[in-house]
Amino acid sequence: MKRTWLYTLLAAMIVSALLLTACGGPQPPATQAPAEEPVEEPAEEPAAESAARKVATFIWTQEFDTLNPYYTNMWFSAITQQLWNAWAWDYDDQNAPHPVLVAEMPSEDNGGISPDGSVITMKLRDDIVWSDGTPITSEDFKFTYEMVVDPNNAVASTYPLDLLVSLETPDERTVVMTFEEPFASWQATLWHGLMPAHIMRPVFEAEGTIDGAAWNLKPTVGCGPFVLTDWESGSYARFVANENYWLGKPKIDEIFMRFVPDDASQVAALKTGEGDLGTFIAYSDIPTLEAEGVNMITVFSGYNEGWYFYLDPEKGHPALQDARVRQALALGFDRFSLNEDLLLGLTEPAATYWDNTPWVDPSIEPWPYDPERAKALLDEAGWIDTNGDGVRDKDGVELVLTYGTTTREIRQDTQAVAQQQLSEIGVKIELFNYASDIFFSSYGEGGPAATGANDMFEYSTVPNFPDGDTSEWLCREIPSDESPDGINWPAYCDEELDALFQLQVTQVDFEERQQTFYQITRKIFEEALWVGLWQDPDIFAIGPRLKNVKLSGATPFFNIQEWDLTE
Amino acid sequence: MVGVSRSVDDLLTPPLTLRQLMWLRFRRHKMALFGVAMLILLVIYSFGGAFFFSEAYANTTNTKMRLQPPMAGHPFGTDTVGRDILARTIYGGQISLIIGLTAALVETIIGVLVGALAGYYGGLLDSVLMRVTEAMLSVPQLFLLIVMAKFFGGQIPDLTVMGRTFSGSVIVIISIIGVTSWMYLARIVRAEFLSLKENEFVLAARAIGTPRWQIIFQHILPNSIAPIIVSATLGVAGAIGTEAYISFLGMGVRPPTATWGNMLDGAYNYIETAPWLWIFPGMLIVLTVLSINFVGDGLRDALDPRSRAT
Amino acid sequence: MTRYVIRRLLQAIPLLLFISMVLFVLMRNIGDPLATMGGRRVTRSSDRERLTRQLGLDKPLYVQYFYWLIGNDWTKMDLDGDGVAETPGRMRGVLRGDFGTSLVNRGKPVLEVIWERLPNTLLLMITSEVVVILCALVVGVYSALRQYSLTDQIVTTISFFGYSLPIFFIALLSIYIFAVNFKRWGLPYLPAVGMFDPQVGKTPSQVILHMVLPVFSLSFIYLAAYSRYIRSTMLEVLSQDYIRTAKSKGLPRRTIIFLHALKNAALPIVTVVGLDLPFLLAGAVVTERIFAWPGMGRLFLDHVSRADTPVVMGILMLISIAVIVFQLITDIMYAWLDPRIRYD
Amino acid sequence: MNTYDGINLTATAAADTAPPLVEIQNLVKHFPITRGILIQRQVGAVQAVDGVSFTITQGETLGLVGESGCGKTTAGRTILGLYPATAGVVRIDGQDLMTAKGADMLAIRRKAQMIFQDPFASLNPRWTVNAIISEPLRVHKLFQSEQERSERVRDLLELVGLSPRLANRFPHEFSGGQRQRIGIARALASDPEFIVCDEPISALDVSIQAQVVNLLEDLQDQLGLTYLFIAHDLSMVRHICDRVAVMYLGKLVELAQKDELYENPLHPYTQALLSAVPLPDPAAARRQRRIILEGDVPSPSNPPPGCRFHTRCPRTGDRCAESEPVWRDAGGEHFVACHSV
């Protein structure tokens, strides 16, 4: 008798939790339109017709933190923007820009770029509207600019809008941006998303900030081919076709985004058909997915995996100060068989940080595997094994280097292979792995890469793809106790290189700028300041049901309105 | 009715010491003997195997031979960079066995001490110890491990045991696991003590003048041995798994050194495609834990005179 | 007893303050919220500097803690970095029920972040806990009664497989067997991820179907721990005198087992369950991750890995309170199970 | 001279010149009741034993009887220092138990032992009989070698009527009576002079009770032991004791030579207790008038004022609720505390 209450209680708890979770979300696809949603799509479709709806399921291994494009650095949030919040212009699968919000790309010829390159004028299309029907005007651009630079808004990045001297809107269709200096990277960096002034301005006026605006997390008004209807944290986000999209209503009715944080379950879900699209697929899973009829597409978005060395003249390992030692390390590691075996031949060894962009000197070939030349270079540099312990040394310092990276499997495997191969040329390597959030912590937070806790590091970062600009090698970015936020983690300062980087930022002329970058890439390659391992493309798995899929590196879903589902 | 109607032969058992009796009871326990034998074999496998394969061999990569199923030359197959899994389970076993057994021991010692003192003395000491326990419990182990990873990451000196240098300090891992996992046992032991100390045999011991530590450790503790043994057994499996995670956070055994735990972690993406990556280390862990459980079972029976095992 | 409860609850206040202080300090050491901000690119130094100021991370740690505790709406903040504090603070502090806003989902109140996940986690975890306890009772009692029988040995071995192997193993294996391969073989297969199928919608039957694999994995893993405790304490109790007495009195077997033995064997079981219950709120990190279950475990992991202090502190304080409450309940249960145990 | 309630305590000592082996003066044991949450203050006490005084001479058996909950077990345990006394003096063989520490305490423990009520709970189930009985030998370091200790254990087993061969068995293999013998052997191991027998037979079958009591008597004869025999069963007490003390709600109400007490009970409480004892003689039994006490035993945390028995006393008068009756000698070493006597 005593125990019955316990059972009753437990049963009641389970039932109520079940009801809470089941009823907490909407009962799709009969999506009940939230109150603030004025115009809405086939919301009250009866359940019987639901089978006719084309629902594509995307699997995201990371959930976006926020959907406001200016409040996030997350790649998953950025690529999701292609669905619901248009950029001023997209890039196609050849990384060529084509206009979306603007009528045509600004150029010197059409007067969009001033001769000195410091003023850019955008002409907006006439037919652009928010998904609720409100026209998109220059006012939305001006409002977005003001919000990004306002100190009350903790946006993720103010770049590049903080470089603007002014933003003028002479009329509803024209946006004039004036920069202090010619701004070379404008095309790749400007207008990655737009905020609807008619929704956000009242919030800002009421609260003094848009940090807490409901639209950030639930932007049911957007300007892409799809529009968000709901987002349940940890579970899913649902996008339905935007009837008002000016480039044509999408063929797919609904995109259901499922958040599956685990790689292995993502693969399983792709195999069971619970997902039609996935990304961030481990190389090792590619063959089995292909065997299940899943299409694998690789697109380059500028990432190249490579070795960084800690080059601080005082705190770094003395051997690494010598370019010959760095070259020997590059020559002593066989990145070709690494690509062939561990990466299954799906990618190529990287030569420079700018591989697969227009900025790399095409004459540069990756370092070959030549252990003999590596040994000769080390001998030449004075690093010889004097005590017979199998490890080279000089002036009593052993050539023992510590090699740190994150815990990603392919990186750990690379470490193991590199350790063995470099030991064959007399370099002893000790391996370290860090959780990635710790690995990438800043100098102020004691991050190992930022503070030079190890001698060499493996990771990949990206210039502003498809632009080539980066501030990673600038002298002023060397982190120190005074400037703990610096991102020049190799702590490398070379006046010539610094000047070249400063120069390319202002070169609006493509060819001139390309030449500057050729100089940069050649210098970094020849001095082995950065040693490429492999080109690290984004890998998408496209389920057999999806058709017409094209992907681009910078804006993957540029043609999503043309995608279709077949049964 | 119980002891009265014994046969004369039964009554004539030669006098034995408590220890002899325990051994007698333990010996009759076949699964426990199997467990002891198995543990000895596992130790021989891990430590004796080192005579057949060098550590360098265990870490030799050959990317051309990656993910080979069991075959001649590689009876357990090869891993993702072509290392021999047999040799790696041998070297991994050394670390995993040391960590699994000693970390569980540390955990047990701390847990028993805290629980026994809190349960026996009660009052203020109990309050203080239990509040500390609650505070420790409130911090998830995962969280503590991440914080410690940040503090210790890459700073732990090497340790040489039996002529072998263990990358990363095994002692630090053992202490970390021990320090972050004793709370369950402490609560269990305390509960047992709260109940057992009210028994008259405790009063009897006090009347005799038996010192307190003897009452705690010789009178009460043996009576709460059953859950302690279970906890210690489960602790071994826990420690082997936690070690892998600590290493994963960059605080523990540094790659390319193998442990059973990190070999299992490395098999993550190959559960279906390359099952030999996990079958062998997995079986070894299961065998270890099972053997310890059987030994524990036998020990429990040997220590419990009322058990019906014999 | 009432006084004991009140005393314990009052003791909880300084304890919670202490725990929160320690956790806050640890939290600030766990990582760098601005390192990459979840992206693949290291945060630009000028954005870092600005965000540090805007999010209040430039303040000394004790100031951050006090703002977290009592809020900062009584003072002004310098958001634009000109050295003049002009913007009033917006936090009301934990003591006034404001756990702040998430750094990751910028601007989203912590309680809202947690509340979205809590029902999902409770659904999964309570179901699993009930399944585990029921199965463990059956297995534990059975193998205690039939000690060293073949069934006992087999069940022991199987449950130790579950316990010895990492959780991800059982979870992934069950996905491969019951979802991927069952589908391949044309058998009725179970869904691998999520809470429902978007084509059908979030109906109770869908949720139940999607719960099968995670509940199975969780239960399988914890079965060994629970059933071992039950088995060993049952063995202990079954051999004790009062059970013999009860038997000799001719009480029915079931009454003996459940009324006498189980109640007396309950101390360790109640202890373990009492220790586990608060963590039902915390969810199951790995299981939720693998089955893409939108629960607290994943929330915790996601926000820990991005050092989102407000959210993580919110979760940890929730757990701390649950730990304290359940430990108190456990202690009360002791006195009920063994009336000789007194606390005053 | 320590006085309590105006009574000269020395008067209670046995008339002979030999000093008593056990001397209890004014023993008080209160279990505090506290209130307050952070700062605890005492608001009352469970007055389990409240001013009990008596002496026991060498070789004598003093019975201590009363209903359950009257404090007699607490008294027994406090006398042996198992509970710290709130006040009073306990002297065993001249040594003050209240102030004794360390080696002195150990010496007293050696001399004063206890036999417990529950033979099932008082033996550690994990220990062999040998270990249990030799524990006092080890604690008091009475023999050097394990061998000698084992021999002593065997002697003790024989002494209490158990086969020495059973030394390696465990408690659960024995019956209740046998276990009680083991408990007795343990109590005897350190060669004590004084043993508190805390209801040693109440948990046993009636058929066994007599055996154990006879054993205790035999041992007393052989070893010259002194007993404090705590019981609620008056008939067995009459059999074994020399003198009997009756306790009610933490206080002694009557103390006399057993025959005197049984033949001529003065206190109404004693009379009530005796009236419940079945008499072997049918004639006497017929004569016996059963006195049934009204009501329940009051709570020891809030005992009634005046005479503690007055709430249930058939002879209660006005004085009884106001002043506490004086503990006095009603003649012939027959002590009683009652206004109406």
Image (cartoon, coloured by chain):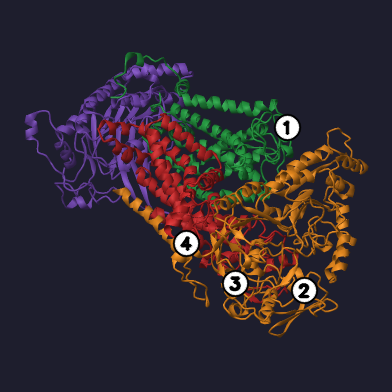
Residue nearer the viewer, A292 or A237: A292
Residue A3, percent from left and from top: 32, 48
- Say what secondary structure mark 3 lies in: loop
Q: Residue at the far bottom: name it.
A: A171
Q: Chain B's colour?
A: green
Q: Are marks 4 and 2 in contact (CB under 8 Å)?
A: no
Question: Pointer 1: what residue?
Answer: B57
Q: CA distance from mark 1 to mark 2?
A: 57 Å
Q: CA distance from mark 1 to mark 4?
A: 55 Å
Asked if badge 4 and badge 3 are on a common chain, one would say no
Q: Nearer the viewer, mark 1 or mark 3?
A: 3
Q: Chain A's colour?
A: orange
Q: Are marks 1 and 3 in contact (CB under 8 Å)?
A: no
Question: Pointer 4: what residue?
Answer: C201
Q: CA distance from mark 1 to mark 3?
A: 61 Å
Residue at horizontal 45%, vertical 28%?
B303
Question: Pointer 2: what residue?
Answer: A163
Residue type, mark 2 in image: Leu
Q: Chain D's colour?
A: purple
